[in-house]
Structures are given as C-alpha cells and as structure tokens.
Amino acid sequence: MNKRQRIKKDEEFQTVFKKGKSFANRQFVVYCLQKDQPHFRIGLSVGKKMGNAVTRNQIKRYIRQTFLELRDDVRQDMDYVIIARTQAAALNFHETKKSLEHVLKIAKVLKKK
C-alpha cells in the first residue's frame, strides 16, 4: 500500500464515519464511503484492548496484505475504514482474509469471482 491509498487524518476518518455505511461481522466493522477518486483508500483502527503493539501491528499488516491481494476485486472509487474487534486478535492471516472478504461481500463492494 502506498501513502496515497491510506486515510491518516482524523477529519477524513470522521467523514467516512458520518457519511459512510457500516457493515460488520464478529471480527471487523467496515465503513464504506463513495468518493470521486481513481483508487480506493483504507484507514485502519485497532484499539489497545487488542493486545500489545506487536499484536496490533500484526493485525494491521494482515488487513493491508488482504487489501493488496484483493485490490483488483474491490471497488476503486471508495474509502474504507476497517475497525478490528477483539476477536480479530486470535486470527491468523488466512482467517483474517476470509473474514474481511465476508464483510466486503456483505457490503457489496467485492466483485464476484
């Protein structure tokens, strides 16, 4: 993920929270907001209840890698904010990818294979 594909500023997060739609399962909450842009952007939120910094960073790496692998299948004109719930700390990469694919299918932003 390059820097243009990340949401970093608080006001951008707040815009997605207020104007976007949310979809969830047990491990993740995904907020989606349509924008006029050539590529998607993602913002990550992993709370301190998840564990120490190593655990939180691992979850963020798994989410970023999942979006890298799905970059051709997700809608490009969207902003996504992913909030990890406490159950996400127990997942390995493949379980994380499967769970995120499930939420993105619920949100109807993932192309059918």
Image (cartoon, rainbow, N blue to C red):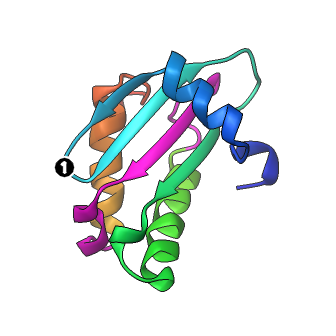
Q: Name which quarter of the figure residue 86 lies in.
A: bottom left
Q: Is residue 40 visible?
A: no
Query: Which residue is label 1 attached to?
Result: 26
Horizontally, is 21 left or right of 69 in the view?
A: left
Residue 96 is one of the magenta-drawn residues: no
- What x and y, as percent, mark residue 5? 72, 44
What is the span of residues highlighted in magenta in the rendered image? 71-92
| Residue plotted at (50% across, 46% down) | 70
Query: Which is nearer the eye, 26 or 52?
Result: 52
Task: Indicate the quadrant containing the C terminus: top left, top right, bottom left or bottom right.
Answer: top left
Tag 1, which secondary structure?
loop
Instruction: Say if the magenta span includes residue 77.
Output: yes
Q: Amino acid at mark 1?
A: Arg
The answer to whether 40 appears left or right of 106 in the picture is right
Residue 22 coordinates in the image, percent (x, y): 37, 27
Number of labelled discs? Answer: 1
Quadrant where the N terminus lies?
bottom right
- Identified at 72% across, 31% down, the residue is 39
Residue at (58, 38) in percent of width and height = 72
Q: Is residue 65 above or below residue 92?
A: above
